[in-house]
Image (cartoon, grey):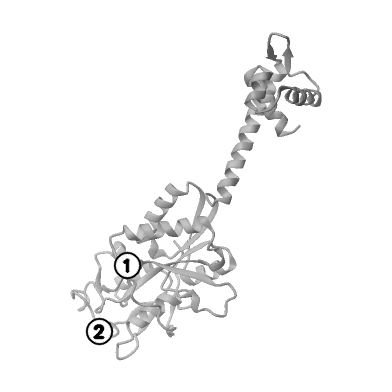
Amino acid sequence: MELRQLRYFMAVADELHFGRAAQKLHMSQPPLSVQVGRLEREVGISLFDRSTRRVQLTPAGRHLQERARRILDEVDAVRADMRDYVDGLAGPLSVGFVSSANYTVLPDVVRLFRARSAKVALTLIPLTSGEQLERLRDGALDVGIVRDENPAADHASSIPLTAEVVFEERLVACLPIGHPLAQRNEVTVEEIVEVPIISYPRLLMPGFVDRVAEALAAAPHAANVVEEVVHQETALGFVAAGVGASILPESVRQLIPASIAVVPLAGAPTTRLLAVRQTRAAGDVRATVFIECLRDAAASSGVLNGSQTSKHSPGPQASTEPRRTSRSARD
């Protein structure tokens, strides 16, 4: 049984007239009659009662009509789905993101992307920047939303990555509310390095750790890192407990409890979110649409947008001597 035969049968079943069915199929009547006859011989039963005056479906014909309609509708749906898949309008898309993206672009980009690509199965995976770059090179991620990374600097990798700045915001110092610097309009790097610092493991967040080191480079001596944590929520917990201060993106204000003050760093140093994907995957329509949504979400966010105000490039690789590492459970 061929799909073509089912379509011929359905045309006759719907019209109950071989001549009109042939016109509908843009063919002559004799070949149509031949094909319907072959189908009847294949199923072993008459599908139509024919007379010189009319054509009617037999009970078996009515049953086949119901089944064939469902089959042909499903075939048409599969064909449309495959066209959408080839055109990048359907299929899976896996996206990694740093936790701070939750408070900046991620909610809006998900809303935009689902409106524009409703058939794409979007999977969001919270990961550090370092973890995302590893998975992007392995092909386990299609797009990464990382902070301050410069993947092009990794010349040892055989899988080149392309990065695009999509969002930029100020770096701020988070201090216990009772600290002498907490009531200031801004704090200098010379002042902040005198405060114990809660930082992050460079292995997992090399770009952001290096960016903070770059921002503090004008200080007379290195920052006193007393704790290293994986998540900014954990860092804020240490700040609230009076352990020290932490340098974070300004969007962290959305998480700040009353026990913590947010003070901008003098000189307005910034930090950036970047969209990253494999260079050879530049033709992936799903990833391209997602990154376009990232740009649009950043443009409508009301804060600095990388395409408009990005002024610094990732600084040189700087090392940070860890004192202790405290890892929290992933959210």
Question: Is there any visible trace of residue 236 in the rendered image?
Answer: yes
Quadrant of the frame with the C terminus: bottom left
The foreground one among 173 and 291 is 291
In this view, 29 is above or below 197: above
Task: Say the numbered circle drawn on residue 191.
Answer: 2
Q: Farthest residue in the top direction?
A: 53
Residue found at x 38% / y 60%: 295
Q: Amino acid at mark 1?
A: Gln
Question: Is there any visible trace of residue 200 in the rendered image?
Answer: no
Task: Say the numbered circle drawn on residue 108.
Answer: none
Q: Is residue 261 left or right of residue 110?
A: left
Report if the CB atoms under discs 1 and 2 are less than 8 Å apart.
Answer: no
In this view, 164 is above or below 24: below
In this view, 7 is above or below 14: below
The image shows residue 323 at horizontal and vertical percentages of 42, 83
Q: Is residue 118 left or right of residue 301?
A: right
The image shows residue 197 at horizontal and vertical percentages of 34, 80
Quadrant of the frame with the N terminus: top right
Q: Amino acid at mark 2?
A: Glu
The image shows residue 226 at horizontal and vertical percentages of 37, 81
Q: Earlier in the sequence, mark 1 or mark 2?
A: 2
SS category of the residue bearing label 1: helix
Q: Is residue 110 left or right of residue 91?
A: left
**Among the 4 quarters of the image, the one containing residue 195:** bottom left
Question: What is the crowding at mark 1: few (fewer than 14 residues within 10 Å), some, or many (at least 20)?
Answer: few
SS category of the residue bearing label 2: helix
Residue found at x 40% / y 81%: 315
Residue for badge 1: 308
Total tally of numbered discs in the picture: 2
Marks 1 and 2 sit apart, C-alpha to C-alpha, by 30 Å
The image shows residue 135 at horizontal and vertical percentages of 55, 67
**Among the 4 quarters of the image, the one containing residue 159:** bottom right
